[in-house]
Amino acid sequence: MDWDPTLALVAVGGALGAVCRWGVGVALAGPAFPVGTLAVNVLGAFLLGVLLYERRLRNVIPSRVRLVAGTGFLSSFTTYSTFAAETVALTPALAGLNLAANYALGFLAVLAGRRVARWLS
């Protein structure tokens, strides 16, 4: 059986995404609201929107790059589990704001990513 570098590529992308997420979390840490998690989730949704719609429109990005960027980097860069845990720890008003912000801004970011992909094509 030949060695397939796919696992290593996803692992490298995942490691880089996790380190970047940690860095953003540290840089944007605040005592009252999880801005860092919101930022990585919105940015990740935007980048995934570009990546997915670029594939549909142009398909210029090589599949291995897409694998490292999407499955590796972005899946570790964004975080649903931290979002959920941080939301539970907030006051009810801030929890509602965090839920609304993550979902609304995430969907808008994907739409913006799609628009950028269309613009690039």
Image (cartoon, grey):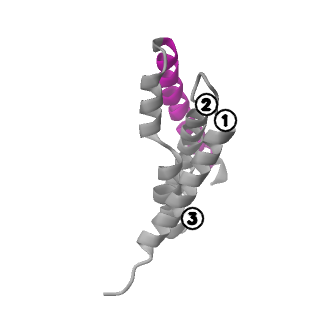
How far across and down, in percent of the image, does residue 43 sit?
A: 60, 41
Badge 3 vs badge 2, beta-carbon distance below 8 Å = no
Q: Which one is in front, 54 or 3? A: 3
Q: Which residues are magenta?
A: 93-117
Q: CA distance from mark 3 to mark 2?
A: 31 Å
Residue 68 lies, with reference to residue 78, above or below; the image says: below
Label whose residue precedes the other's in the sequence (1 or 3): 1
Residue drawn 55% across the image and 30% down it: 105
Q: Amino acid at mark 1?
A: Leu
How far across and down, in percent of the image, does residue 17 sit?
A: 55, 54
Label whose residue precedes the other's in the sequence (2 or 1): 1
Q: Amino acid at mark 3?
A: Ile
How far across and down, in percent of the image, does residue 5 sit?
A: 44, 77
Which residue position holds label 2? 35
Q: Which one is in front, 80 or 56? A: 80
Extreme residue in the left direction? 1
Q: Amino acid at mark 2?
A: Val
Which residue position holds label 1? 28
Q: Which one is in front, 45 or 116? A: 45
Residue drawn 47% across the image and 17% down it: 96
Q: Based on the picture, tell me whether residue 1 belongs to the magenta stretch.
A: no
Q: Is residue 14 visible?
A: yes
Residue drawn 50% across the image and 33% down it: 107
Q: CA distance from mark 1 to mark 3?
A: 31 Å
Which residue position holds label 3? 61
Left or right: 73, with 2 as reference point: right
Residue 76 lies, with reference to residue 6, above or below; the image says: above
Extreme residue in the top direction? 93
How far across and down, in percent of the image, does residue 63 sit?
A: 49, 67
Q: Secondary structure at mark 2?
A: helix
